[in-house]
Amino acid sequence: MSDRSNPLTVRVYWEDTDAGGVVFYANYLKFFERARTEWLRALGVEQTTLKADTGAIFVVAEVNLRYLAAAKLDDLLIITVKVLDQGAASLELEQQAWRADTLLAEGSVRVGCVDGVTLRPRRIPKQVLDAL
């Protein structure tokens, strides 16, 4: 199982499910996004402060997901984040969604660091690299 040192716990609500009563596939992207934000926050990196202080923001550049089992209404999910690779201007992250000991979905997400105004690539700020 992925590192659960700072996982995000997510409850599945009606709004997360499709007509079949299972989590709509695209909602895993929302769960993963929230987990990345809270993971950074736990490392001491507030994204609004990062943008205000450095002008840097992170954008998703690539996502690959694999679905293994269905999550359903009221399930309690654990969403994990783990750094796979770190570049000068991007991070590749592994993310997983678990229900207890059952892996439901996993994927890799590449986020790029860009200037918040021009959206041009830029180096990841030192305070983020230090936190990683």
Image (cartoon, grey):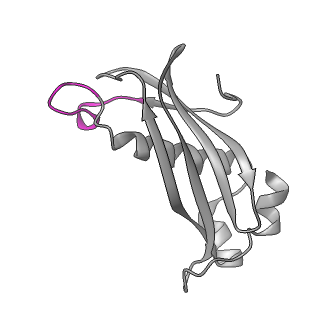
Residue 99 placed where, x, y %?
A: 47, 19
Instruction: Residue 129: name its quadrant.
Output: bottom right
Side of 113 relative to 101 (left or right): right
Q: Residue at x 33, y 44 (%)?
A: 26
Does the magenta segment cover residue 12?
A: yes
Query: From what the image shows, is residue 67 above or below residue 99?
Result: below
Query: From what the image shows, is residue 72 above or below residue 64?
Result: above
Residue 47 placed where, x, y %?
A: 61, 62
In this orientation, which residue lies closer to the viewer: 23 or 73? 23
In this orientation, which residue lies closer to the viewer: 10 or 81? 81
Side of 10 relative to 4 (left or right): left
Residue 130 placed where, x, y %?
A: 85, 57
Side of 69 relative to 82 (left or right): left
Does the magenta segment cover residue 80?
A: no
Query: From what the image shows, is residue 102 above or below residue 96?
Result: above
In the image as oriented, which residue stretches furthest toward the bottom? 118
In the image as oriented, which residue stretches furthest toward the left? 19
Q: Residue at x 77, y 67 (%)?
A: 88
Side of 14 relative to 66 (left or right): left
Q: Main secondary structure of the magenta part?
A: loop
Q: Residue at x 70, y 76 (%)?
A: 53
Residue 44 placed where, x, y %?
A: 74, 52
Q: Residue at x 38, y 20 (%)?
A: 75
Q: Which residues are magenta?
A: 11-22
